[in-house]
Each structure stands twice: as structure tokens, then as C-alpha cells.
Amino acid sequence: MVDIPLAGRRVLIREDLNVPIRDGAVASDARLAAALPTIEFALKQGARVTLMSHLGRPVEGRFDKAFSLRPVARRLSELLRQPVELVDCRARGVEVGQGHAALLENVRFERGEKADDPELAARLAALCDIFVMDAFGSAHRAHASTHGVARLAPVACAGPLLVRELEALTAALEQPQAPTVAIVGGSKVSTKLGVLQTLAGKVDALILGGGIANTLLAAAGHPVGRSLHEPAMLEFARRLLDGEFGAADIPLPSDVVVAESLDETARGLTRGMSDVGANEMILDIGPQTAEEYASRLQRAGTILWNGPVGVFEHPEFARGTEAVSKAVAASGAFSIAGGGDTLAAIQQFGVRDHISCLSTGGGAFLEFLEGKELPAVAALKARAGADGRN
């Protein structure tokens, strides 16, 4: 992108502006902040910029105010210090002045987006002279706004944010500074089978959180009460712990924070691993475990982080994720953190400036770690080869 003349040209930039919205406002602007340098560069070059993104999972083909990008347009206007008009995503043309930007309404309101519909992709391609794919967080989706338009636009290229994230992840996986520690949180082992298997063979230590950790605790014979876990994944969890997929050390919590409910009145209680009650839920790691994990992270050379280790949105169950986030920030390691919940935790605990690379991707982050080729990146590579560019 930086090598292409942009002045006066219609530039369509696919960003990942899928941010949390609460009470009609952007609750975390980490992804907007990550996208800003690309947008500002295009504006300073005198481009006529149209931005494009999805938000949430609305019913395709139907407008839903709850998933409107209007709050994003308002926040972008503040960050860019100029009005960013929200334009109907069905627009056949977008009028934008030089050095100004508009934002298309949620592209998932369009029928055919997720199916990579050629007609929709062609209509999006007609909005621009240059298409810039800058949304690493959506690069694992072969959608019309990420993959189809990259194939059909007059010129298609990768944006600086996408390039930076790919380079950082590649370096962390192929030339890591040892020891390498990966932190993977999440509700289900079943959705992260591939990445857990891959990381077990690539990293020195694998710290797990959330329902994934609970499933491994159950597999190791610890009581988990009513905690979120997957009984169907116990055999896989045992194989993971036994080192079948790699030699990574997988530490399990020595203490946890539990409660019988997760409502506003819930109060956390610290339990040893043999003391979790039948009616209790594990909702965070305990202070001893947090100290153990922090010690590992402070000795790390490379850290890959995707997912919190507890229900950090609730103050009673936030201390574990806070301790982990501050340990990552204090470490001298090269650290990459990705995923919406991870970025929200980083913002909540004020450590954004101390993470080496913030990845806007969640699913894309995990698929890249797993070794999968991202469809949008593959489309850009094919275009570069066909056009004779490196």
C-alpha cells in the first residue's frame, strides 16, 4: 500500500472494526486504534477513503440497529478529528472528498457476504480504484469483503497493519526467543483442538485458562463442580497432558476462585484443587497459581497470548487475568496478544503500551498459530503473482 500512489484515488480499506458496543457507544477502541495508522496514511496521501467492516453476527440481509456501525463511525470521527459519514452498505457508489473518509454500514447486513458471493464482491470492487486488505482479524474468512473483493478490485494489496501482524507472528513462530510460553483461554477445548496440538509441539510451556483449563483439571482427576467444561473432551485432554502431541509443559492450577453464581452479588472464594464443591463453579485462577504463572512469564523469551484465564469482566474474578496481563507487560519477552477478550483485558488493566504486538485477530490469530493459510492472504498473494509484483 505504501508504495502505491493514492492521491485522488478511491481507496476501499477492509478493517476489523468489530468492537464491543455497550449502551450505544464503543466500549473498547483497541481495534480502532490499531487501524488508525493505515487510515491516517491514506488520508494524508489525499485518498478518497471508504472503510468497510463487519460487526457481530446479525441475520444476513437484514438491518439490525443493535449491530449498526454508527457508534464506530462516531468514535472514528473523534479519533480522526474529522467527520466520518456512515453510508448504507447497499450503496452503489460512495462520494468522498480527497483526504476524507466514509464508513460503509455493517457488511454482514449484505446478503451473500459470508458466502463470498461474486455479485456482492463485484459491487464492492466497483467502489474503489484500490482495495486494501488490512483486517488480519478477518483474514481467515473467505467472505465477499475480504476474499472476493481482493480477487476483483482493479488493484488489491495488503495494508500495513496486516503486514505487521503477519511478520510478527511469523517471527514468533519460526525464530522465537526461548523459552516460549503460550497462554490460551477459552470456553471449549473442542474449538481449539488444532491449535492446542500444534502449540504443544512448538512451545516450552502452555498455560490454559477458562473452560479449557477446567476440562484438563477434570481429566487430571480434580473436582470441578458445576464449572464450564467438556466431558466429551476428557480423553483428548489426558492425551494432551501425557505429552502425546508435544513436550510442552502444561501447568495446572494449584488453587482457584469459585462461586455458586455469576450474578452481580457473587463473591469469590479461594479453593485448593481438591476442595471445589459440587455446586461451585471455577471462575478464575487463585493467587498462588497467579504467582506461579507470573513467574513463568517473567522468565519467558517469547509470549503468545490468546484468551483470559478467568471471567475478568466481573471484579470478583478478574485478579488472575490482571496478574497474567501485568506479568506479560513486565516481562522482557517479545509478546503478541490477540483476540477480542484479550484486547479488552489489556485495555482494562492498562498494559497496552507494554505489549510488543497487539493482534486484532482472534480466530485468525489461532488459525495462523495452527499453521493454516488464511484465505484473504492467499487471494492477495495470488493477485501479486498474477500482476508480477513481489
Image (cartoon, rainbow, N blue to C red):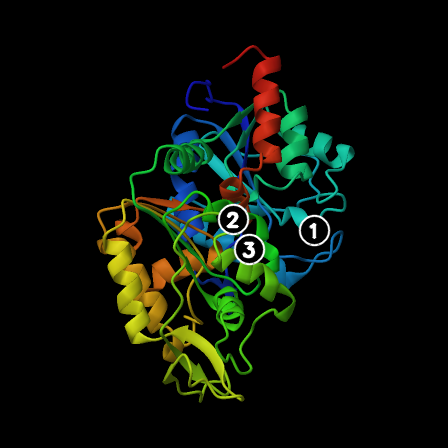
Closest to the camera, between mark 2 and mark 3, is 2
365 lies above or below 66:
above
Residue density around tag 3, few if under 14, some if 14–19, many if 20 or more, within 10 Å:
many
* Label located before the other in sequence (1 or 3): 3
Q: Quadrant of residue 89?
A: top right
Residue at (46% x, 18% y) in the render? 5
Residue 236 % position (x, y): 59, 59
Q: Badges 1 and 3: C-beta atoms under 8 Å apart?
A: no
- The answer for how far apart the CA atoms under marks 2 and 3 are is 46 Å
Q: Is residue 153 visible?
A: yes
- Give the number of the disc on residue 109: 1
Type of amino acid under label 2: Phe
Closest to the camera, between mark 2 and mark 1, is 2
Type of amino acid under label 3: Arg
Under circle 1, the secondary element is helix
Q: Quadrant of residue 343?
A: bottom left
- The answer for how far apart the CA atoms under marks 1 and 3 are is 13 Å
- The residue indicated by pointer 2 is 245
Residue density around tag 1, few if under 14, some if 14–19, many if 20 or more, within 10 Å:
many
Residue density around tag 2, few if under 14, some if 14–19, many if 20 or more, within 10 Å:
some
* Label located before the other in sequence (2 or 3): 3
Nearest the camera: 28 or 12? 28
Under circle 3, the secondary element is helix
Type of amino acid under label 1: Phe
Residue 287 % position (x, y): 29, 75
Nearest the camera: 384 or 204? 204
Nearest the camera: 94 or 287? 287
- The residue indicated by pointer 3 is 70
- The answer for how far apart the CA atoms under marks 2 and 1 are is 41 Å
243 lies above or below 160:
below
Q: Badges 2 and 3: C-beta atoms under 8 Å apart?
A: no
